[in-house]
Image (cartoon, coloured by chain):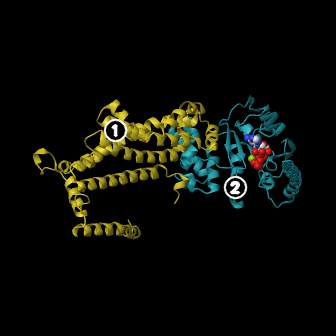
Amino acid sequence: MNKGTLSRAARGLWVPLLIVALWQGAAVAGWLNPQILPSPWQVLQRWYAYLMPMEAYDPAQGSYAKWLVSGELIHDAIGTLYRVIVGFLVGAVLALPLGLLMGASKRVYGWFNPLIQVLRPIPPIAFIPLSILWFGLGNAPAIFLIALGAFFPVLMNTIAGVRQVDSIYLRAARNLGAGQSTLFVKVILPAATPYIFSGARIGVGTAFIVVIVSEMIAVNNGLGFRILEAREYFWSDKIIAGMLTIGILGLAIDTAMNALNNHLLRWHRGLEH
Amino acid sequence: MTAQIKVEHVSKVFKTPGDDVVALRDINLEIPRGQFVCLLGPSGCGKSTLLNAVAGFSLPSSGRIMVDGATITDTGPDRGMVFQEYALFPWMTVAQNIAFGLKIKNAPKAQIDAKVAELLETLKLTEFRDRYPKDLSGGMRQRVAIARILALDSPIMLMDEPFGALDALTRRSLQDELLKIWEEHKKTILFVTHSIEESIYLADRIIVLTYRPGTVKRDVLVDIPRPRDPSAAGFNALKRELAELVMEEQQRHQQAELRGLTTD
Ligand SMILES: Nc1ncnc2c1ncn2[C@@H]1O[C@H](COP(=O)(O)OP(=O)(O)OP(=O)(O)O)[C@@H](O)[C@H]1O
Ligand SMILES: [Mg+2]
């Protein structure tokens, strides 16, 4: 990191710091009911308690590192992340081949399009009752909902990506001796990746929204579950700590996706700097 | 010696919602192995249509095109094409682009590597081997496109205004490189251009097409020894002669457009 980015980061810290200071000031002055809006300091303490292990370190139970990550927050974050990743992968792995086929063949498109047009506008949240009927409680309905949320963005973008492949690449490849399958794997698929990737990014975003909602309903761990549980005990400090954790995790996922995107699409014109 | 490429009574009609466009009518050509042929004519006279028919991208409406005695039904690596728009695969590096044709033929890796290294050297691309096309200049992109078809050792090279988008200096140096490659590898080249000077600088033979329908207006052999000097008297005499022919067709083109405007 050089001086420029450091000072830019510092500039971006002013506003949040000011808000936190005002908030803390208001709490110290006694203007806020701590049940409704706890002070930032209280949130921070609760956040730390949420992060750290509940029992003291005991060498007989295992290594120090293992103890350090045995806190509730870490467990919740891992649970949430696991559902996002598995659900997203299930959705994307189903959407990708279907999208490739629908984009490449008018016939296949004609078969599936009407069904998709009807299902796509239904928010994944609306599938909650059915998913519980079908899968009961636990990870299965949550993963089903997340996969559903990731499926459509990846599907639609894959179709669009295949359709916009410039025919000159197809002609060049056929001229160089490419057969149908080579054309698909070595030309159409890579040429469509910028679109597929932006679909994947939207899909991960949707998956992250759906995971929080589905954790509030179907499972008993994860960040979504934890903030709903905290509400039952009127732990507003823990609710806010949980929400901030959700924000940071979401930011981390998007940053990781972006880095992967920039690496895999380093050939792409749109990324010229 | 029998012709390598035979174009027999080839016509091409494009069906459009308005009326049909007769892009080519009754073209007959015999091109012997190793000849450098330029197709010359104003915009819209059917040069690309004829080249695409030989490439096998779009077959003639009637007549046939034969290469080494076999009628063309599809495109293939025996007729390597260099497009005006480069058509390099942007997701592949320079080296990967050049290797593409060999790779899909499942050539042994050592052979591919050796061939790619050799071509990078020939076309002065070695230091750019791991770059992506977006980072290359127009001239370098066209070098990669040429290397890509040389990798497959296509006996025939088809080129559709390959240097049209380049500046004059880059253009001349690529023309010289192409001539060197052509002489060394004994290729048959069918080269589309609308630059009269380019056609005289390069070709053994220049075929001037008429505008709509596209027919052969003149078939000229260029017997000026190479390297050709564009300021020499013989070069200029031929240039004047061809300019007159092309201008006639250009005027028919403009008149056709004017008629189109008044009847619309
Ligand atoms: N797919 C098509 N559908 C309808 N008309 C077409 C099609 N392709 C070409 N034409 C018409 O056929 C004629 C010949 O086109 P062609 O592209 O071969 O010309 P050209 O000599 O290559 O011109 P240019 O120098 O502009 O590239 C033109 O009048 C064009 O409008
Ligand atoms: Mg053309």
- In the displayed structure image, the side of residue B96 where residue A168 appears, left or right: right
Instruction: Name the image quarter holding residue A103.
Output: top right
Instruction: Name the image quarter holding residue A183.
Output: top right
Q: Quadrant of the N terminus of chain A?
A: bottom left
Q: Answer yes or no: disc 2 within 8 Å of ligand 1.
A: no
Q: Is residue B35 visible?
A: no
10 Å neighbourhood of mark 2: few (<14), some, or many (≥20)? few
Identify which amino acid the numbered label 1 is placed on.
Ala
- In the displayed structure image, the side of residue A39 where residue B170 appears, left or right: right
Q: Determine the residue positioned at 25% across, 43% down.
A: A221
| Ligand 1 quadrant assignment | top right
Residue A142, label in figure: 1
Label 2 and label 1: CA atoms lie apart by: 55 Å
10 Å neighbourhood of mark 1: few (<14), some, or many (≥20)? many
- In the displayed structure image, the side of residue B105 where residue A122 appears, left or right: left
Q: In this view, does A90 lie above or below A71?
A: above
Tint applied to chain A in the drawing: yellow
Parent chain of label 2: B
Measured from the top left, where is residue B157 in percent x and y?
70, 42
Parent chain of label 1: A
> Do discs 2 and 1 belong to a common subunit?
no
Q: Determine the residue positioned at 31% across, 45% down.
A: A80
Instruction: Name the image quarter holding residue A87.
Output: top left
Q: Is residue B148 visible?
A: yes
Q: Is residue B191 above or below residue A271?
A: above
| Chain in cyan in the render | B
Measured from the top left, where is residue A28 in percent x and y?
22, 68
| Residue pointed to by mark 2 | B165
